[in-house]
């Protein structure tokens, strides 16, 4: 750091040092990348959540069908024993 730079990377006239400016640009780019990644991750979560809901509905339907079939099987067995 130069003697006219403050501890925060600003010169006494309020301008950023070239090192601080470069660091700021680097941090802004990193923030933008993270924003894109977060947006993509949220989209994936929404897609997976929708798929999970579909699968839960299919499972529920299959369980109802199984229950109905088991009831019918029990009735048929009872009729055969009579």
Image: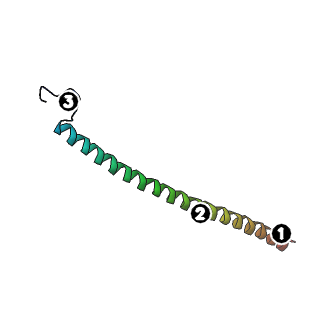
Image mark for residue 67? none
Dot 2 crowding, Cα within 10 Å, few <14, some 14–19, many 20+: few
* Residue 66, position as x, y percentages in the image: 69, 66
Would you place residue 29 above or below residue 5 in this image? below
Quarter-wise, where is residue 7 in the image?
top left
* Residue at the disc numbered 2: 54
55 with respect to 77 (left or right) = left
- Residue found at the very far right of the displayed protein: 82
**Residue beneath disc 1:** 78
Q: Position of residue 46 (x, y in %)?
A: 51, 56
Q: Quadrant of residue 55?
A: bottom right
Decide which of tag 1 and tag 3 comes sooner along the chain: 3
Callout 1 secondary element: helix
Q: Residue at x 35, y 49 (%)?
A: 34
Which image quarter holds the N terminus?
Answer: top left
Name the spot of residue 79 as percent of width and height, x first.
85, 72
For the residues labelled 2 and 1, the Cα–Cα distance comes to: 36 Å
Q: Nearer the viewer, residue 35 or 12?
A: 12
Up/down of 53 relative to 31, above or below: below
Callout in the foreground (2, 3): 3
Mark earlier in primary sequence (2, 3): 3
Q: Residue at x 77, y 66 (%)?
A: 71
Residue at the image position 54 percent from the left and 57 percent from the top: 49
Question: Which residue corresponds to mark 3?
Answer: 13
Are dots 2 and 3 in contact, CB under 8 Å?
no
């Amino acid at each position: 750091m130069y003697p006219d730079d403050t501890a925060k990377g600003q010169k006494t006239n309020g301008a950023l040092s070239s090192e601080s400016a470069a660091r700021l640009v680097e941090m802004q780019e990193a923030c933008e990348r993270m924003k894109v990644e977060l947006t993509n991750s949220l989209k994936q979560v929404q897609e997976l959540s929708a798929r999970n809901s579909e699968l839960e509905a299919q499972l529920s339907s299959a369980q109802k069908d199984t229950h109905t079939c088991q009831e019918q099987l029990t009735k048929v067995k009872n009729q055969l024993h009579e």
